[in-house]
Structure formats: C-alpha cells, structure tokens
Amino acid sequence: MTLSSEPQDPLPVVKCVARARIPTTTGPDIFLHLYANDRDTKEHLAIVFGEDIRSRTLFQRRRGETQQDRMVRGAYVGKLFPGRTMADMDENLGMSLKFDETSGSLLVDPKTTWHNQDTLVRIHSECYTGETAWSARCDCGEQFDHAGKLMGVEREGDIIGGSGRGVIVYLRQEGRGIGLGEKLKAYNLQDLGADTVQANLMLQHPADGRDFSLGRAILIDLGISNVRLLTNNPDKVLQAEYPPYLQCVERVPMVPLSWTSDHDGIHSAEIEGYLRTKVERMGHLLQRPLKLHSSVSKSNPSTKVTTHTLV
Ligand SMILES: Nc1nc2c(ncn2[C@@H]2O[C@H](COP(=O)(O)OP(=O)(O)OP(=O)(O)O)[C@@H](O)[C@H]2O)c(=O)[nH]1
Ligand SMILES: [Zn+2]
C-alpha cells in the first residue's frame, strides 16, 4: 500500500482512441473503449457499463475537429441516430455536455456524467485459452462472464451488483504478462507435474510479472475514484489504489461457480490445482465454503455427512 507521504510512481499516459456502443446478447448495451498508452503498443480496453461513465481523454475537445469527428470516435452524449449532427447534445434525450472553454476539458455534470460514487470494477487480464478456447485449466472465462453479469444486476445473493454501472478494465496481459506462447509452454510443464508458479519460474519468468499501472490510469481517465473491486487477488487490491485519486473501498470476492453448485462452473482436475496454487502460493483470498453437512435428503435421512476441507 503506497502511503500518501511516499512519492508514487507516475502513472502511464493513456488516451482513449475510440468508444463504441455494443448491444450485447445478455441484455445491456456496453461501451467498448480502446486505449493507447506511452508504455506499450498493446490495445488495452475498458468495457464500460453505463453511457454516463466518460473518458476524459476521449471527450477532450481537440483543435480543429468537427462535431462529426467527435461522433465518429464515440465522444457523444446519449444515443446516435441517423441524421444526428451534434455530438455534445442529444436533443431527443434533452442531454448536453459542458466544457471548460479554455482547456476544452469535459466539465462534470451530475445529470450527464457518473462521478464520486462507488463503482463496481474488475481489472481483468487477458486469457485467450480461458475466454475463447473453452479451457478448463483456469476460471478466467467464468470470471469475465460473471463480472459482466454482476455489473448489470442490483444484487446476486449477498453481493451488491453494479445496477447497470461498472467497468471491466481488460488488460492485454496474457499469461500473467508472459504472453500466450510462453503460457502454452507453461501448460506443458504443468502436465509434467509443475504448478502454475513453478512452470513460470522454470521458464525464467516471474510467478506474476503483471503491471497494473495502466489499469489505474484507465480508471482515473474514466473518472472512477471509489472502486469496489471484483477479485480474490490481494495484490490487485493494492494495485487498484492511487491516493488521493483512486481508492479501493471494497473487495468483492469471486467464488468459483463450481464451489457453489454441483453442475455449474468448471469441474476439472486442472482447475482444482490452479485454484489451490493461487491460494497456497499466491495468497489469493479464496476459501471454499465449509459445508458440515451435505444436503440430507428427506427420503434418506441417514445420508452420510460429508465435510469439505478448506482450500
Ligand atoms: N503463466 C500462466 N498464466 C496463467 C495460467 N493460467 C492463467 N493464467 C493467466 O493468469 C491471468 C489471470 O488473471 P486474472 O483472472 O485477471 O486475475 P487473477 O490474478 O487470477 O486474480 P482474480 O482477480 O482473483 O481473478 C491471465 O493473464 C491468464 O492468462 C498459467 O497456468 N500460467
Ligand atoms: Zn485463464
């Protein structure tokens, strides 16, 4: 945790290049933001739930640009429709943006811009295998889907959702930063008996070489200050802090679905090893709910008691 008296590393410079509305198969429209930065050439993303969470760099007025230019890059208020000519005003919805006439910066107006509220956030690292190749080696794909669902609901059990507001910062940090090729080699080493940490070290990589400063810079660019962070990773909680601009006000756990249901979620030998390593070797805050009694079926009250060890 960086105490406010200690100098903080300067954040990378990020710039939102484009934003577009994505109608989703699961219900809400989301707004995909693509970022450039001064640290790498990757296309890091922010998946934003809520039209009024606004990137300051995207909405910054640029010299010589037209209202059409602004609409094309996604710097518009409300909804686009054929024939619309003004980016900064949506007459149909009666919404208009205000700017500092000198600097051209967006002025925060509670009627049009989300600010100073706790925001549900996931800082998610890319995992091609888990998100696209149906892998049962990790829970990244499940976490990505679950985070998206939680952004859209008021609550799920005792977890308070985002009620339609939230941000998934999607960092192109495949393989905890080592890239897909090296991660595939790590998988082979895991099939030869190594765990995910040992495999990275055997390939001469750190156990976790990720840098989350880009995530912090993107959240600050989106005007997010109080983060309710969806994670089990204590390091991410620390990494989501940049006082006084960004603070993590709550860690929201992500319990694997397979631990709360016998049929949902990922059930595989590999995922158990993956989760166990995260807990035992990376300090992840995951605890399998301790069930003292299996659900004793009415028809057979003598169902044997099963206990689950804590992982
Ligand atoms: N090197 C390596 N990376 C892996 C392996 N399995 C998953 N990963 C990567 O681990 C990262 C998972 O990151 P996240 O899901 O964002 O977060 P986390 O650090 O697991 O913690 P949570 O926020 O609690 O999910 C992704 O970059 C995956 O590609 C593995 O076996 N080896
Ligand atoms: Zn994964």
Image: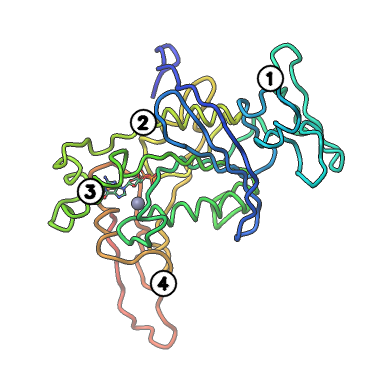
Marks 1, 4: nearer the viewer = 1
Q: Tell whether label 3 touches label 1 (CB within 8 Å).
A: no
Q: Mark 2 or mark 1, which has the lower sequence index?
A: 1
59, 275: nearer the viewer: 59
Residue beneath disc 1: 105
Find the distance from the CA under tag 1 to the CA under tag 3.
Answer: 45 Å
Residue occupying the point 76% across, 44% down: 79
Q: Quadrant of the N terminus?
A: top left
Which of the 4 quarters of the picture holds residue 173?
A: top left
Q: Any atom of ligand 1 within 8 Å of the CB at mark 3?
A: yes
Residue 291: image x %, image y %? 36, 64
Find the distance from the CA under tag 2 to the CA under tag 3.
Answer: 18 Å
Q: Mark 2 or mark 4, which has the lower sequence index?
A: 2
Residue beneath disc 4: 263
The amino acid at mark 1 is Ser
Find the distance from the CA under tag 4 to the CA under tag 3.
Answer: 26 Å
Find the distance from the CA under tag 2 to the CA under tag 1.
Answer: 28 Å
SS assignment at label 2: loop
Numbered circle sitting on residue 154: none
Numbered circle sitting on residue 211: 2
SS assignment at label 1: loop
The amino acid at mark 4 is His
